[in-house]
Amino acid sequence: MKLFSQFNLGRGGDSFGDLMKQQLLWLLLLRVVLYTLLLLISLLLTDERFDVITMPPSLLILFTLGIYLITVATAFLLIHTYGEFRRFGFIQTILDALFASLLVYLTGASQSIFSSVYFFPIIAGGLLVPIKGGLIGAAASTLLYGVVLALEYFGIVPDYLEYFGLLESHNLFASINHFATKGLSFFLAGVISALFGTRLKSTTDALTSTRYDFTRLTLLYKEVFDNISTGIITFDGTGTVTSANTAAAGISGINTADMVGRKLAAIFPTIDLESQSSRNVCDFQCPNGQTIRLGYACSGIQPPEPARQTNEASEQQTYILTLKDIGEIERLEAQMRQAEKLAAIGMMSASIAHDFRNPLAAISGSAQVLAHEFASREDDRRENYELTRIILRESDRLIKTIADFLKFARPDTVDRDWFLLRPCIEDILQVCKADPKWPKTARIDVQVDAHFRVWADEKQLFTVLSHLINNAMAFCPKQREHLEITAQQLRIADRGDMSSITVFDNGPGIKADETKKIFEPFFTTRADGTGLGLAIVKQTVEAHNGFIVVSDSPLGGAGFSIFLSLSSLDDTPLSS
């Protein structure tokens, strides 16, 4: 019979105490079972046909009930006891030896057929407390049996035993022989139970340690299995899914419980397990209708050696399928290839653009000389003057385009410092108004405090704001041009304090599908635009550890807001 049930896998003293308590409870249960069986056997042996010494039925029932009551009280005390279980075990061993002695004394002493009951406390003690428990049980049983023999020798026995002739005098040597024989057998049983108890304890400790380590490994495996970002699915030789982790469920959109027990081919019909390619890719349609790109790999785990020799070895074969949603990876790879191409084209274009600057400068200089000469002549040569002005205008436009391209291809290093923003904006507007193309009807509202400071490269911020102002003015309605420039300090989550500078216009605004495209190089909706202005703005702002946001303007058009991070090492106030 199994002496104890499953116990705590911890290695501390609490697990030993729980184990000891469970063993003691099993001992009490076995005591009840043992004496119940002895009660039934004794009742059967009361028949006169059996020449056996038994207790009177009333005394037998009273004796058994007494043991039941003591056992129940002991169990109640044990359940509400914490610690000191070894001492409790010793007490129960001695108590069982006392019960056995009473049974033997009341059923004929040396002639009792129940003297073998002494082995119960001896064996139980050896199993409860190895070595000491068995020896204490043997010593208690031997001493108490000696007391029973002494009482028998001196004739101190129950009166009902007179019927069996036990009130007659006894031979001393016969009593000593009984005592020596039983005592030797008791101690021999005690030694054997101690050996078994020691072996059981060492086996239990090893099992506890093994189960503890196994549980830790199982928990570690489960933690890794459930939290790894790669989807993992295991299936057997029949193609039935045996397990799947959380990542596999997240990638496929199918719950783990719905995958286990199903055929892999039914869940992922596009996966080819026979493929020998080093990189397997397929399209998979999720339950929600979305199609994703899956990268996968499959490997097998050989079953244990004994299983390989059976006919079921193929079914016991375990396979591991790893999954990864590579749609984003493929997109990034395509972007990297595109970026590499653009980088190569950019380097070549920058070199070509740099080589174009000198010829254009020569053309522009020569055209200026011709224009000056044609302007001083008579009206019949006026046509040549207009043609020369066209050459100058287009040359200037090409020079500006090349300058913007080189600025985008080879951005300057950022040299930040604190400076006042309003004077910078006023300088920009002064330069803009000096341009003949600048509309005379334009109205600019600069709502920036005179003492507002920003932490940036003043030269590069000058270029950024120039592009934003000129770009906004290009989309304003003719004769009703209206711009508004604001600046403030904001606290943004995960960003901290930042300076915000916004340029609003009253133009037609920006379409929703063009919001992300407008910052791409060479994308423009203007007939005379190069598509580099806003790309330069975004590149410069990001170089300042900032970002740019497009929004609707309170004037009815679009608003471009640039956010610049502040220096955490400078205590200069933003405004005074």
Image (tube, rainbow, N blue to C red):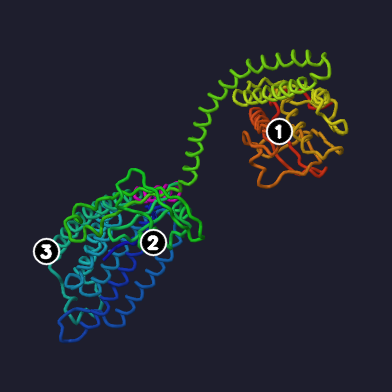
Quarter of the image for residue 123 reads bottom left
Q: Disc 3 residue type?
A: Phe
**Measured from the top left, where is residue 539 in percent x and y?**
64, 30
In the rendered view, would you say 186 is above or below 333? below
Q: Nearer the viewer, residue 553 or 203?
A: 553
Q: Disc 2 residue type?
A: Val
Where is mark 3, residue-wise?
Answer: 173
Q: In the shown orientation, is residue 546 left or right of residue 193?
A: right
Q: Residue at x 86, y 33 (%)?
A: 442
Q: Magenta segment range?
A: 213-228
Label whose residue precedes the other's in the sequence (1 or 3): 3
Asked whether disc 1 touches disc 2, contact meaning CB atoms under 8 Å apart, the reply is no
Where is mark 1, residue-wise?
Answer: 528
Nearer the camera: disc 1 or disc 2? 1
Q: Nearer the viewer, residue 13 or 94?
A: 13
CA–CA distance in space, label 3 to label 2: 77 Å
Q: Residue at x 53, y 28 (%)?
A: 345
Q: Which mark is residue 260?
A: 2
Q: Residue at x 66, y 28 (%)?
A: 540
CA–CA distance in space, label 1 to label 3: 133 Å
Our reading of the magenta stretch's main secondary structure is helix
Residue 464 visible, this angle:
yes
In the rendered view, would you say 410 is above or below 247? above
Callout 2: 10 Å neighbours few (<14), some, many (20+)?
Answer: some
Residue 86 visible, this angle:
no
Q: Quadrant of the N terminus?
A: bottom left
Q: Secondary structure at mark 2?
A: loop
Q: Secondary structure at mark 1?
A: loop
